[in-house]
């Protein structure tokens, strides 16, 4: 057998799937909201502090009387890095971003639907939520440049 016959061309392997978050009782409202296109946050009924990520008590005053509400889905780009490293479910380059939600909290996410370059990803740029369904259980809240620029 010659050397070339051992070097058969193999089809490209499908990219590994993205890691999926595991909802908990404390985060279920967030994941259920994402499924129906609502970005949900929590707010303390005692001190009015809005926070993310979800938890059963206010991180500011420790009050357990908190409410869930639908956020606007508007944000600004606070910080980001552009990764050129392969990762399950991602095709480089891709952004790993922290967005400042209009309601106050910051959220780690990805910015999509724009070039993944420093010229396109400007700090403080206006963003809006975009929901991406992964499967029947998980829909992710990602962000894209706001269509109206605000």
Image (cartoon, grey):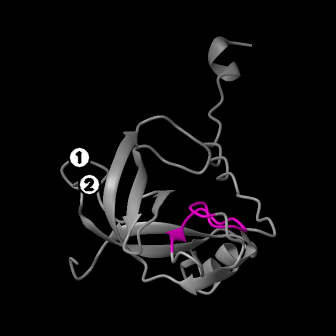
- Image location (x, y in percent) of residue 38: 55, 84
SS for dot 1: loop
**CA distance separating discs 2 and 1:** 5 Å
- Image location (x, y in percent) of residue 127: 32, 70
* Above or below, 9 relative to 88: above
Q: Nearer the viewer, residue 11 or 17?
A: 17
Res 112 seen here: no
* Above or below, 16 relative to 139: above
Q: What residue sits 34% from the left and 49% below the top?
A: 79
Q: Residue 144 sits in which quadrant? A: bottom left
Q: Which residue is mark 2?
A: 121
Other residues around mark 2 within 10 Å, as few (<14) / some (14–19) / many (≥20): many
- Highlighted range, magenta: 49-61
Please, what is the dominant secondary structure of the magenta stretch? loop
- Residue 96 lies left or right of residue 6; in this view the side is left
Res 147 seen here: yes
Q: What residue sits 37% from the left and 42% below the top?
A: 81
Residue 145 on the magenta segment: no
The quarter of the rendered structure image containing the N terminus is top right
Q: Nearer the viewer, residue 140 or 104?
A: 104
* Above or below, 111 relative to 30: above
Q: Which residue is mark 1?
A: 118
Q: What residue sits 65% from the left and 43% below the top?
A: 13
SS for dot 2: loop
């Amino acid at each position: 057998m010659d050397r070339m016959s051992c070097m058969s061309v193999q089809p490209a392997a499908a990219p590994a799937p993205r890691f999926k978050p595991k909802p908990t009782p404390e985060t279920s409202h967030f994941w259920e909201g994402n499924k129906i296109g609502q970005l949900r946050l929590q707010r303390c009924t005692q001190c009015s502090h809005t926070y993310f990520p979800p938890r059963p008590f206010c991180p500011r005053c420790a009050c357990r009387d908190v409410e869930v509400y639908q956020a606007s889905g508007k944000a600004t780009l606070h910080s980001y890095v552009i990764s050129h490293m392969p990762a399950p479910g991602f095709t480089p380059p891709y952004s790993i971003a922290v967005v400042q939600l209009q309601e106050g909290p910051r959220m780690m996410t990805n910015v999509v639907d724009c070039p993944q370059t420093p010229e396109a990803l400007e700090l403080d740029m206006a963003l809006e939520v975009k929901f991406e369904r992964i499967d029947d259980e998980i829909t992710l809240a990602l962000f894209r440049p706001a269509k109206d620029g605000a």
